[in-house]
Structures are given as structure tokens and as C-alpha cells.
Amino acid sequence: MDLFESLRLSGRAIRSHKLRSTLTTLGVVIGVAAVITFVTLGTSLRADVLGQVGGERTPNVYVWAGPEGEDGAPGAGAQPVFTERDLAELRDLPGVSAVVPRGVVPTAAVSSGGDTVAQRQVIATSPEYFDSGEFVAGRGFEPGQREVVLNERAARLFETQATVGDEVTVRLASGESVNATVVGLLNASTSGGPFEGLDSQPLVFVPTDPFYDTTIESPETGRSQRVYPTVTIVAEDFGAVSDVQASTRAYLTNRSDAATLAPGDYAFSVETDQDLVDRLEELLTTLTNFVTGIAVISLVVGSIGIANIMLVSVTERTREIGIMKAVGAQKRDVLQLFLLEAVMLGALGAIVGTPVGILGAYAAAEYIGLELVFPLEWFAIAVGVGMAVGAVSGLYPAWNAARTDPIDALRYE
């Protein structure tokens, strides 16, 4: 029996049981649609996040001390261990352009123009934190001055949007209030750094002097100094980043105040932008694979449905198989006929499931405001997997039909 004749007979068998064929392929449709939806969302999410993190690489090295062996966001579990002496020593390392400390000042609220909004904390740092191109108005603050810089979302917290020159009152968690002047507004495209979570949350920046007063006695000098939980080291250029990373790690390990102040089960993290991108990409890939693996279970269920219905079909068509063999059909002809029918069911489910999955991904992306990125190779893989599911699930029923004895088949009632 030639292939075209087998296709014709298989198609006729499928059409003669439209409802049963539709229900049989439904499992494959759901499985393929689920895989397409989750893979598309995962690819879109990875492209979006990596675009934010890696879009504007800087020659920065991010340093903090956190629980050893514990994965988490940059700065997770960081303790204030980097003293002013450590910052000065790090500035003297070869290839270092600037060292930017970052501390958190606990607050209760921020007021401007008679409007008070709750604000859990403000960020204390140095002027080197800012790039002049990030400002839509004003400038960075000056050390020792009561000045603040707001990002766009922080400025919009107030009914009368805060602008450069406005007076704000920072109400500290201790109950003390500090008046300051808004000297700079960051533009809308400026997001927080890795330590701020890279999203556009309201951020208020203040100079370490006079706002940040967390101090400790330096183990090396014996003098009380400000101490910070996280530090950003800016290399002179991208070529110097790896050397700066290595020398920073060596200093922190061998002769820093931080090595003495850090708890025993804490370890230093010294990571570059590329390290953070790699970690994030690995995390997103693992998450996508996990969710896709769950969706694949639907495909397995679909394949079981095809195998089940093909076994039923073989039983129902036992006399037909006997007649085919009586007029000269070989085992391979019967095997080919039933195998093609199973493959057609799987392919049909994959072809219908692919656009359903795309629609599902589109709806989900619109709901969460994500720009959709289509992994085209997965569409071809989905159709191929659907056909493979049909072939695998139909193999045993087809083999069972091929080995049917023609005499017994003709006697079958």
C-alpha cells in the first residue's frame, strides 16, 4: 500500500469519528498551547529583564558581605562592615576611578508643599553615584549640605509635584525631622541600581554627610567611622574591571576592616555587571524550564489519550484488518495505516495548539504589560513534538494491529 493511499484511509477514519478525534486531540492542543504560552512569556520576561540590567553596562564592581552560600538579589542580607578606612584603601587600588558608598537611612515620611507621604527609607550616598546625563533638572547634591535628589516617581508622590528648589522635610525613624532642598530630579528612564532592585520605585537620595550616622570603631585605626553595607567601585574603563575585581577581593580578604567586622558565616560578594547579568539569566532560564516542564505534563496526558483511542480503534476495526490481510495487505501496510492515523492526530493537535498558545501568551503579556518576544524555533519544535507524541503513542496500537492473525480477525464479532 503506497503512502498516499494510507494517508487517505487514515484521514477517512479520523473524519468518520469527528467528535472522538476532536476530544482525542484536545489533550495535545492544551499541552502544546501551554508550552508555547509559557515559553513565549519566559523568553519575553528574560529579554525584558536582561535588557534593563545589561542595556547600559558600566565598569562597576558591586561589593557587599552577606550570608555565605545564600543566593539572592545583590546586597541581600548585607551588613554594614565597610568603614571609611576601607573606602580610602579601595580608592588607592590600581584602575579604580571612584568608590561610592551606599547606606540606608530609616525614615517615617517625607513632606513637601504641605503634603506628607510615607517613606520607609532614603538612600545615603556620595555625588559620584549620579551621572550628569541622568538629570532632567538640577544637579547632584554637595557633601555636607542638606540637599536631596529625587527620581521621577518620588517627585510625583506629592500632590504638587516636587521640583528643583522646593523644600522637603525628611522625618527620620528616630522622630527627628531634617529640612533639605531639592537640588536634582532624575529623568524617567533612570532606574535604581542593582542594590535598589532595578525597578522604578520612589527613591530619595541624600548625602552621607550629614544624614548618615551609622558608625563603628575601625579595628585598624581605633577611631569611630561611618560604616556602610554596600559599596560600588567604579573602574577607570571596562578593560580594568577584572583587575579591579581581583584586587578588591584580595584587599577585603587580607587587610580590610570589613574582614574583621563581618560575621563568621558571612562572605564577600564582589560582582560586576556581567556577573549580575549571568546570575539573572541563569535564574530566569531555570524558572522558564521549570514552568515549561509542568506544561509538558499536559503533552504526556495528551499522548496517553491518543494511545487509548488508537487501541479502541484497532479493536473496533479488527474485521477490517482481517479483510485487508485476506486480500494481500502486509504487516507493514497495517502498521503504516494506524501509525499515520496517530501521527495525524498529534500533528492536528500541535497545529491548532500553536495559535492558541500564541493568543494565550499575548493576553498574558498585555495583562502584565510585557513586550512580547516570539521564540520562533519553539513553534517548529511544538509541531514536531506533537507529531512525535502521535507517533510514540500510536506505535504500540499500530504494532498490535499489524500482528493480528487474519483468521481470528475475520471471526471477530
Image (cartoon, rainbow, N blue to C red):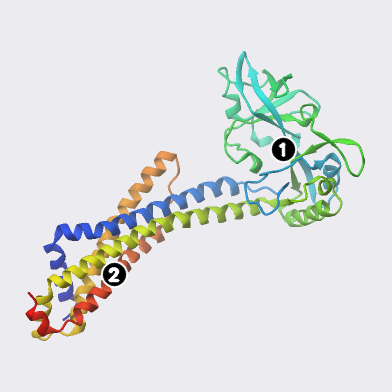
Q: Nearer the viewer, residue 301 or 368?
A: 301
Mark 2 residue type: Ser
CA gap, disc 2 and disc 1: 61 Å
| Position of residue 134 measured from the top left corner of the image (x, y, whole percent) | 64, 35
Local secondary structure at mark 2: helix
Residue lying furthest top = 114
Which quadrant of the structure image shows residue 157? top right
Q: Quadrant of the N terminus?
A: bottom left
Does label 2 or label 1 sit earlier along the sequence? Answer: 1
Q: Is residue 26 visible?
A: yes
| Position of residue 389 measured from the top left corner of the image (x, y, whole percent) | 31, 67
Q: Quadrant of the C terminus?
A: bottom left
Q: Residue at x 31, y 53 (%)?
A: 355
For residue 345, the mark is none
The residue that disc 2 covers is 393
For residue 129, the mark is 1
Which quadrant of the structure image shows residue 309? bottom left
Q: Residue at x 86, y 42 (%)?
A: 85
Q: Is residue 163 left or right of residue 4?
A: right
Q: Residue at x 74, y 51 (%)?
A: 265
Tell me, yes or no, whether the two marked residues, 2 and 1, touch with CB atoms within 8 Å.
Answer: no
Q: Is residue 136 left or right of residue 330?
A: right
Q: Is residue 239 left or right of residue 111?
A: right
Q: Is residue 256 above or below residue 21?
A: above
Q: Nearer the viewer, residue 113 or 290?
A: 290
Mark 1 residue type: Tyr
| Position of residue 49 measured from the top left corner of the image (x, y, whole percent) | 54, 47
Which quadrant of the structure image shows residue 108? top right
Viewer-nearest of labels 2 and 1? 2
Q: Residue at x 43, y 47 (%)?
A: 372
Q: Is residue 324 visible?
A: no
Q: Is residue 117 above or below residue 114?
A: below
